[in-house]
Structures are given as C-alpha cells and as structure tokens.
C-alpha cells in the first residue's frame, strides 16, 4: 500500500477546519491540523507535509508570514500551498501568490471544490516527466526530479519558479506574454494588471537564483519574456 499523502490544514475557525479535514480524509489523504500560524510552523518543522492548506487570517503568526517562512526555507520551499481567503482579502491573496503560494480558494467554498484544487495542485507538483536531463550552458535541469543545477550547484526553486522556467524553455525561444505565462504557470485566464506583476516578480527571483545563467531569460519589452536557447549562441 502506498503511504497516504500528508496534508496540513491551517485554519483557526474550528468548524471550517473540521469540514475540510473530514472531506480530505474521505478523499484518502492523511490530515493534520493547526489552529494558528505558530503551531503550523512547528508542525511543518516536525513533520514536513506534502501540501499545506493555509488560511490567511490567523492568530499569533498570520498566513502570509507562514507562507513567507515556508517558501524561504530550502527544506520546505517545494511544498505546495493553497490559500483560503475571504473575498475582501484580494490584496493579501496577491501578496500570497507573489510569496510563492500555488493557488487559492475563496470562502465560502464547497469541500468538493477544495478537493479538486488539492488534486490539481498535487498533480502539478508530482508530475513525473521523463527523467531526462536537459543541459544549456552550465544549467542542468532534471525534469523528472524537478531539480535545477547551475555550475554544479543545486538551485532551490519554488514550484512556481520551476514551472515558469520549464514553460519558458518549452516554448523554445519564443516570446511568451505575461498573460500567457499567468495562464500556463498559474492557471488564470483573467489577466489583470496586478497579476502581471506576479509574473515580473517571479521572473526576477528566478533570474537572481540562476545567477549568471539568469541572463538567458530575456525581456521582450512591453510584452513578456523568452528563454535564450543553446542554439542561439
Ligand atoms: Ca481565519
């Protein structure tokens, strides 16, 4: 029997936490719960989950800070995060996505909707592409293991940064608009100004992490980005 996927539900409203846990357990996941941000960080440190469902408005340490700390730690940066947000928390939602959260569900939501998002996010994060290694300059990307090395050093990328890099490389040097990148990497079809900024921010973080190889991500002024392929040199 394969071990069940571990999900941490972080939510201070006990009723919501209970409904979410009950439904995800029924869907076959192993659930643990934290009722405030501090408890969440402690639990994540003790027993790394494979996905985090994170309410933003939390006592002690708020959800955005939890997200920030999870994404800043190389040991946990790859854990997908689905935010639970109120309709009125749009600004926080954008900050959360910029910090590396993978998706969000707006309250009130149906347990079925949340379960579908969990499944989709897990599928994206565990996608087992053929285990071939792609090389370009000093870059070595293992698609199957989702690891990136530059000058033989492992680069810790968040889920979104990896998907962004992969999407750029897969388009083989063609320019991709911010809207297209949002759609392909984040899965949104409505491209609004504030979300385009999310793309810019992730590109800049990705370039920074890749060091000198970051120069391969070229800006197409006013449009978007493209990846400079090995055969262009
Ligand atoms: Ca709350």
Image (cartoon, rainbow, N blue to C red):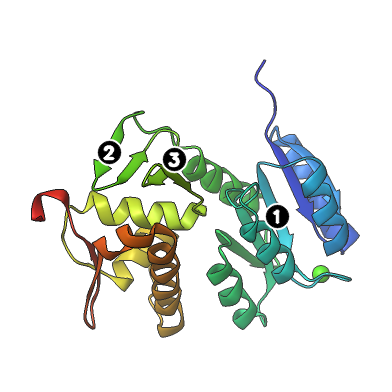
Q: Nearer the viewer, mark 3 or mark 1?
A: 3
SS at circle 3: loop
Distance of label 2 from label 3 (alpha carbons): 11 Å
Q: Classify 1 as above or below 155.
A: above
Give the crowd class for mark 2: few <14, some 14-19, many >=20 residues within 10 Å. few
Ligand 1 within 8 angstroms of badge 3 C-beta: no
The residue that label 1 is drawn on is: 53
Q: Residue at position x 81%, y 51% from top? A: 19
**Quick check: can you spot residue 130?**
yes
Give the crowd class for mark 3: few <14, some 14-19, many >=20 residues within 10 Å. many
Callouts 2 and 3 close, C-beta under 8 Å: no
Question: Is 175 situated left or right of 189 in this image?
Answer: left
The residue that label 3 is drawn on is: 146
Ligand 1 within 8 angstroms of badge 2 C-beta: no
Q: Nearer the viewer, mark 1 or mark 2?
A: 2
When asked about the image quadrant of residue 26, the answer is top right
Q: Quadrant of the C terminus?
A: bottom left
The residue that label 2 is drawn on is: 134
Give the crowd class for mark 1: few <14, some 14-19, many >=20 residues within 10 Å. many
Residue 186, given in percent of the width and then of the height, sits at 44, 61
Distance of label 3 from label 1 (alpha carbons): 22 Å
Distance of label 1 from label 2 (alpha carbons): 33 Å
SS at circle 2: strand
Q: Residue at position x 37%, y 36% from top? A: 142
Residue 94, given in percent of the width and then of the height, sits at 56, 76
Mark before the other along the chain sequence, 3 or 1: 1
Q: Quadrant of the N terminus?
A: top right
Question: Is 181 situated left or right of 75 in this image?
Answer: left
Mark before the other along the chain sequence, 2 or 3: 2
Residue 225, given in percent of the width and then of the height, sits at 26, 69
């Amino acid at each position: 029997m394969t071990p069940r996927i571990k999900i941490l539900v972080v939510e201070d409203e006990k009723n919501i936490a209970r409904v979410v846990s009950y439904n995800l357990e029924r869907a076959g996941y192993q659930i643990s719960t934290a009722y405030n941000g501090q408890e969440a960080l402690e639990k994540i440190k003790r027993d790394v989950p494979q996905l985090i469902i994170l309410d933003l408005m939390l006592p002690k340490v708020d959800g955005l800070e939890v997200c920030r700390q999870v994404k800043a730690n190389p040991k946990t940066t790859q854990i997908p995060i689905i935010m639970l947000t109120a309709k009125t928390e749009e600004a926080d939602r954008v900050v959360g996505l910029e910090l590396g959260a993978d998706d969000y569900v707006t309250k009130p939501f149906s347990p079925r909707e949340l379960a579908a998002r969990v499944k989709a996010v897990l599928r994206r994060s565990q996608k087992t592409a053929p285990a071939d290694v792609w090389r370009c300059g000093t870059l070595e990307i293992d698609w199957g293991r989702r690891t990136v090395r530059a000058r033989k050093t492992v680069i810790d990328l968040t889920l979104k940064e990896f998907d962004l890099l992969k999407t750029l490389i897969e388009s083989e040097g063609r320019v991709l608009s911010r809207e297209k990148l949002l759609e392909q990497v984040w899965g949104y079809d409505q491209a609004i100004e504030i979300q385009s900024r999310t793309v810019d921010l992730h590109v800049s973080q990705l370039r920074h992490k890749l060091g000198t190889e970051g120069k391969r991500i070229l800006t197409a002024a006013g449009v978007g980005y493209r990846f400079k392929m090995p055969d262009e040199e």
